[in-house]
């Protein structure tokens, strides 16, 4: 394997690790369930894409042509991760409604903060 591909693969895998670290930090910093769902959903998908690019680079550099079978994994993951996030959010909203708990305010109100006046 040529040395430049090893550097590319290593950089992509390190970037993927940074995405997972950011995902964990977002999970720890955000205060409620609905906000916590957002950070891991986005960063884990990006991290998976980076691992996919690293795998394609690694296996294609062996000299046997372009290896694209890894695309199947990332396509399924890219479809299932957002769908799972939406299903979890709807289930959490349903449980809050059933329990009579107050629902969270819309995101645009959270971004603006409490209204004064």
Image (spheres, rainbow, N blue to C red):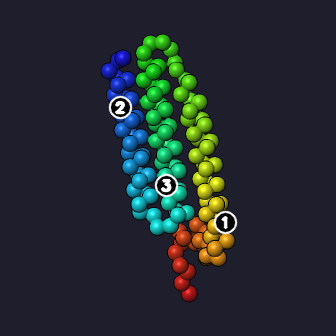
Q: Residue furthest top?
A: 64
User: Height in image: 28 above or below 57?
Assistant: below
Q: CA distance from mark 2 to mark 1?
A: 43 Å
The residue wearing badge 1 is 94
> Residues under labels 1 and 3: Cα distance?
22 Å
Q: Is residue 24 above or below residue 17?
A: below
Can you identify the residue that label 2 sits on? 10
Q: Tell me residue 4's x, y (percent).
A: 34, 23
In which quadrant of the rendered view does residue 80 lie? top right
Q: Quadrant of the C terminus?
A: bottom right
Residue placed at 65% from the left, 60% from the top? 90
Sort mark 3 into few (<14), some (14-19) or many (20+) by Cα contacts within 10 Å.
Answer: many
Give the mark toward the camera: 1 or 3: 1
Q: Horizontally, is 79 left or right of 14 in the view?
A: right
- Residue at 38% across / 45% down in the picture? 18
Q: Quadrant of the N terminus?
A: top left
Mark 2 or 1: the one toward you: 1
Q: Position of residue 77 (x, y in %)?
A: 57, 39
> Which residue is at 52% across, 44% downward?
45
What numbered label is drawn on residue 110?
none
Q: Residue at x 41, y 53 (%)?
A: 24
N-term-proximal mark, 1 vs 3 = 3
- Where is mark 3, residue-wise? 39
Residue 13 vertical placement versus 92 (above, below): above
Query: Mark 2 vs mark 1: which is more N-terminal?
Result: 2
Report the residue that reaches farthest toward the front.
Answer: 99
The first of marks 2 and 3 along the sequence is: 2
Tag 1: Cα neighbours inside 10 Å, few (<14), some, or many (≥20)?
A: few
Specify few, some or many for label 2: CA neighbours under 10 Å numbering under 14, 14-19, or 20 or more: some
């Amino acid at each position: 394997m040529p040395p430049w591909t090893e550097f590319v693969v290593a950089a992509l895998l390190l970037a993927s690790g940074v995405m997972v670290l950011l995902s964990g930090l977002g999970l720890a910093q955000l205060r409620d369930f609905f906000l916590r769902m957002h950070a891991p959903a986005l960063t884990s998908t990006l991290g998976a894409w980076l691992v996919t690019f690293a795998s394609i680079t690694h296996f294609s550099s062996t000299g046997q042509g372009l290896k694209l079978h890894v695309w199947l994994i990332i396509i399924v993951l890219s479809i299932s991760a957002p769908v799972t996030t939406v299903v979890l959010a709807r289930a959490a909203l349903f449980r809050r409604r059933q329990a009579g708990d107050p629902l969270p305010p819309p995101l645009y109100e959270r971004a603006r903060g409490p209204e004064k006046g």
